[in-house]
Image: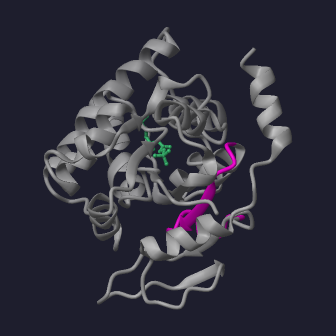
């Protein structure tokens, strides 16, 4: 029987609602500071979220909406400057304590630590942004709780490519059937699935209409004793919150890895 050995968490939207109230706000602050008349409304940001990664998202915005650009600017330099400034604004937002963890995240991470379940992060976000969220919203030493924090440009292709999950599995020397992923987007699910990982989705306003048919379980959030979660799709949940007992049963039910994917991975790595 397969046993649960590790939990792998996505960051933005999964640990905390960082996209609408964090990254989006910081991007707008960086645009204003650069003297650019650009503004990402909540609605536009929902469209832009189809592209992962801050730099890639700015690039996509310029291509899609053709906003006014400074005359004669070097586009890559401009994007790098905006993204650098945005990272500073995002850190300041986190420091101000305006962004807190989603229900049940802290409880599940504590439970995993108590039961020696290994922890990892797999995010498209820049490493310093992931670390800042862990330090400010979880605990100053929280980054050390995670054996691997795989972030940003560490792999060549961002989600929905499976690269970041393959990277985590390789670093931890774990088989996918011994791990469970917590994600919030279809891109994240596709990435995890590409690495044969069983995935639980906690939706948010930006992702609740996405296709999560491949997930083992879809919840509104992980829940806690005084704030029960709702199961939206998948394996029936007979308790008010998601904990390691549910994680273990999902992993034990998971199908054996897709051998054609494993063979392809081996061929690709030749
Ligand atoms: C989140 C993302 C990121 C952040 C901003 O990915 O898509 O692009 O919005 O990232 P995940 P930057 O859900 O995998 O955590 O740090 O690059 O600005």
Question: Residue 196: image x %, image y %?
Answer: 69, 48
Query: Picture quarter containing residue 28?
Result: top left
Vertically, is 257 above or below 100? above
Whether residue 7 is visible, yes or no, is yes
Question: Residue 70: image x %, image y %?
Answer: 45, 18
Query: Picture quarter containing residue 199?
Result: bottom right
Question: Residue 36: image x %, image y %?
Answer: 38, 31
Q: In which quarter of the image is the C terminus?
A: top right
Q: Does the magenta portion include 202?
A: yes
* Magenta segment boundaries in residue numbering: 195-211
Q: Which of 129 and 227 is in front in this view?
A: 227
Whether residue 29 is visible, yes or no, is no
Q: Nearer the viewer, residue 175 or 239?
A: 175
Question: Residue 123: image x %, image y %?
Answer: 46, 41
Q: Does the magenta portion include 205?
A: yes
Q: Residue furthest front?
A: 1
Vertically, is 148 above or below 183? above
Q: Which of 166 and 36 is in front in this view?
A: 166
Q: In which quarter of the image is the N terminus?
A: bottom right
Vertically, is 240 above or below 45? below
Give the overall secondary structure of the magenta segment. loop
Q: Residue furthest right?
A: 260
Left or right position of 12 against 195: left
Q: Which residue is drawn at 52% across and 69% down?
A: 248
Query: Picture quarter containing residue 138?
Result: bottom left
Q: Which residue is drawn at 15% across and 45% down?
A: 141
Left or right position of 162 against 96: right
Q: Which residue is drawn at 13% across and 53% down?
A: 96
């Amino acid at each position: 029987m397969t046993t649960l050995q590790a939990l792998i968490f996505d960051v933005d939207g999964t640990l905390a609602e960082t996209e609408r109230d964090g990254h989006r706000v910081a991007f707008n602050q960086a645009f204003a500071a650069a003297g650019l008349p650009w503004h990402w409304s909540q609605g536009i940001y929902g469209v832009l979220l189809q592209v992962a990664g801050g730099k890639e998202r700015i690039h996509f915005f310029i291509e899609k909406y053709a906003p006014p650009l400074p005359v004669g600017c070097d586009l890559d330099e401009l994007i790098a400057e905006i993204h650098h400034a945005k990272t500073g604004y995002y850190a300041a937002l986190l420091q101000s304590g305006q962004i807190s963890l989603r229900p049940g995240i802290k409880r599940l991470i504590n439970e995993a630590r108590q039961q020696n379940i290994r922890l990892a992060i797999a995010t498209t976000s820049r490493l310093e942004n992931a670390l800042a969220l862990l330090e400010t919203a979880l605990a100053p030493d929280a980054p050390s709780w995670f054996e691997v924090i795989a972030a940003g440009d560490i792999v060549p292709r961002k989600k929905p490519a499976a690269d970041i999950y393959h990277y985590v599995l390789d670093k931890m020397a774990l088989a996918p059937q011994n791990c469970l992923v917590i994600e919030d987007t279809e891109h994240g699910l596709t990435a995890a699935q590409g690495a044969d990982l069983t995935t639980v989705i906690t939706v948010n306003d930006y992702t609740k209409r996405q296709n999560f048919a491949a997930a083992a379980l879809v919840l509104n959030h992980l829940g806690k004793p005084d704030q029960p979660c709702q199961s939206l799709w998948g394996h029936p949940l007979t308790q008010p919150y998601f904990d390691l007992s549910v994680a273990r049963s999902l992993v034990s039910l998971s199908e054996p890895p897709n051998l054609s994917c494993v063979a392809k991975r081996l061929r690709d790595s030749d």
